[in-house]
Image (cartoon, rainbow, N blue to C red):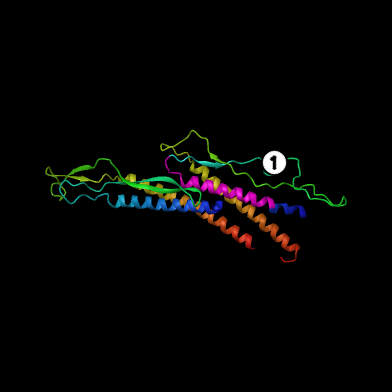
Amino acid sequence: MADALTQAIRIAASGIEAFGERLQVISTNIANANTTAMTPGGNPYARQEILFAQKFDKAMGVNMLTVQGVVPDSTPFTEKYAPGHPAADDKGFIKNPNVNPVIEMSDLVEAHRSRERIMRAYQMGTELQRMTIKSMGS
Amino acid sequence: MFENFKLFSILPSSLKFLAEKEKVVTGNLVHANTPNYKALEVKDIPFESALGTRGKLPMSIHKTSDQHLSSKTSYHASSIPVKISEIKTHEAKMNGNTVKIEQESMKLSQVGTDYMAGMMLYRKYNSILKGLFGKS
């Protein structure tokens, strides 16, 4: 088992990685906020959600943060009357994605702040370790 | 002046303790959004127990003659016990998480400062010793 500072750095690294993936999922949702189907009556882009979980890392002896999975949101799609659209069904309605840009933006800010916070913890860990190594050598 | 030498035996255990604290706080910050994660803390311990047995001198110098000087303040610098336990709180988020981000951020900078202070002390004493040996 590694020393406590290395463990702290590794936990923080796992957090940075997981939050990077979270940011990616949110970006995908925002980018596809208007993506409809191309075939009549088809389903549009479904909002994706990321699930976090803690996983015990045997080599390091600590609980890491991992992505358990990315699952589609089951909120119903909104319907809009657009008879000329290629995805319109026989009544002339198309389905729009269940992405709410306001929610995505607030998620984006929250994820970004969390990631920054973990980054600060990571920097603190590396700084303390570097200082220790320097002091032992001087 | 030489009784300051015991710093070299006390300091590592103190730094180790602080590093454990740093690890736990980092874990809490990373898992601030993880469902059902319970925030952990390293229990602070009383001063006396950190310095080993109270009133006794477990590490006194063995004397071969009565003329020898005895050290009056020798401490048994046992390593500080690290007890990690869940923070008892009734405040939990909807997902069962009990991390309070503000508190953990404060703890992180506190631990960082303490650790750096310990490291500074170590360097200072090291340079004093080197000065004694004429290698400053």
Q: What chain letter is assigned to the residue under label 1?
A: B
Magenta span has B11?
Answer: yes
Q: How many marks?
A: 1
Please name whichever residue, A92 or A15, is drawn nearer the observer in this view of the structure. A15
Please name whichever residue, B56 or B6, is drawn nearer the observer in this view of the structure. B56
In percent of width and height, residue A134 lies at 60, 61
Farthest residue to the top: give it: B90
Q: Is residue B130 left or right of residue B24?
A: right
Magenta span has B65?
Answer: no
In percent of width and height, residue A71 lies at 32, 45
Q: Is residue B24 left or right of residue B45?
A: left
In percent of width and height, residue B65 lies at 86, 52
Farthest residue to the bottom: give it: B135
Q: Is residue B10 left or right of residue A128?
A: right
Farthest residue to the right: give it: B67
Q: Amino acid at mark 1?
A: Glu
The overriding secondary structure of the stretch rendered in magenta is helix
Q: Where, quadrant-wise, is the C terminus of chain A in this rendering?
A: bottom right
Give the labeled residue for mark 1: B48
In percent of width and height, residue A34 lies at 24, 50
Q: Secondary structure at mark 1?
A: helix
Q: Is residue B29 left or right of residue B80?
A: left
Q: Is residue B62 above or below residue B88?
A: below
Assess disc 1: are there few (<14), some (14-19) or many (≥20) residues with their C-alpha within 10 Å of its C-alpha: few
What residue is shown at x 75% (from left), y 48% (from top)?
A: B59
Please name whichever residue, A111 or A106, is drawn nearer the observer in this view of the structure. A111
Q: Which residues are magenta?
A: B9-35
